[in-house]
Amino acid sequence: MVYWLTQNLAEVPPDDDWLTSNERAYLAKRRFPKRRAEWRLGRWTAKCALAAYSRQAKPDLRAVPFERSNPRDAQIRLHRMEIEIRAATDGAPEAFLNDKPLMMTLSISHRNEIGFCVINPSGFAVGCDVEMIEPRSDHFAADYFVPEERHLVMRASAQDRPWVSTLIWSAKESALKALRQGLRFDTRSVVVDFENTGNAEDWNSLSVRQIEASRTFHGWWRMAGKLIQTMVAELAMARPLALRI
């Protein structure tokens, strides 16, 4: 089972008390306010996801103290917090508790002041992405999509093409994160296919095939307002469950 959570920038506390000393030291090295805000949003979303999972699924993480300090705006304070989200050597996020790795995988994304986190307690590879729905040119498709994907875009109505191309791009990003490569890999090395049940606000299935390795990732996509959310995993997974704070 895979779990997901979104948070917005306004929900991130203004102080840094919820960050560990290592995280605060890392944040201090980031010079640009926009990058600092995005990094904080991603970490906040990931920690909130782990907190919510600890309450819903009751794993070993349940002993970590979380409490609400402001019921009015439902912000979570992470007191005496020892969960740390570290970047591995390849840049992928990894969760630690009391300096020991948690036996689960997670992926983080953010766009337009929305943070998106997916966690997989089973530990197999997972990737997620959130993107703003916007038109993408034919030149963009030629540079980043394979012929099958360009055909999917062209087959869509003019009204649907922006979200179809956004979905394909987002699913590629999710798969490349699951591969722990990100955009270091050619986006044309993976091929996206997806199902559209007609209810884009619910989770619909998708698949992403890695060409050279003959490897397929399975996942889900949905439309959330003006955003597309995608997630994939190296094993087929049931419909993802939303985490509640």
Image (cartoon, rainbow, N blue to C red):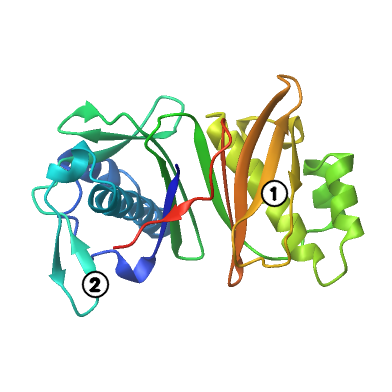
Q: Residue at x 52, y 40 (%)?
A: 127
* Amino acid type, callout 1: Trp
Residue flagged by tag 2: what amino acid is it?
Ala
Vertical comparison of 142 with 34: above or below: above
Q: Residue lying at the far top in this picture: please name it.
A: 213
Residue 73 occupies quadrant: bottom left
Q: Nearer the viewer, residue 221 or 93?
A: 221
Give the class, few, some or many, for how many residues have Cα within 10 Å of label 2's Cα (few <14, many ≥20): few
Q: Secondary structure at mark 1?
A: helix
Residue assigned mark 1: 169
List the residue tagged with mark 2: 74
Q: Nearer the viewer, residue 92 or 16?
A: 92
Image quadrant in which the C terminus is located: bottom left
Judged left or right of residue 241, residue 142 is: right
State if disc 2 and disc 1 touch (CB < 8 Å).
no
The residue depicted at 51 percent of the width and 65 percent of the height is: 112
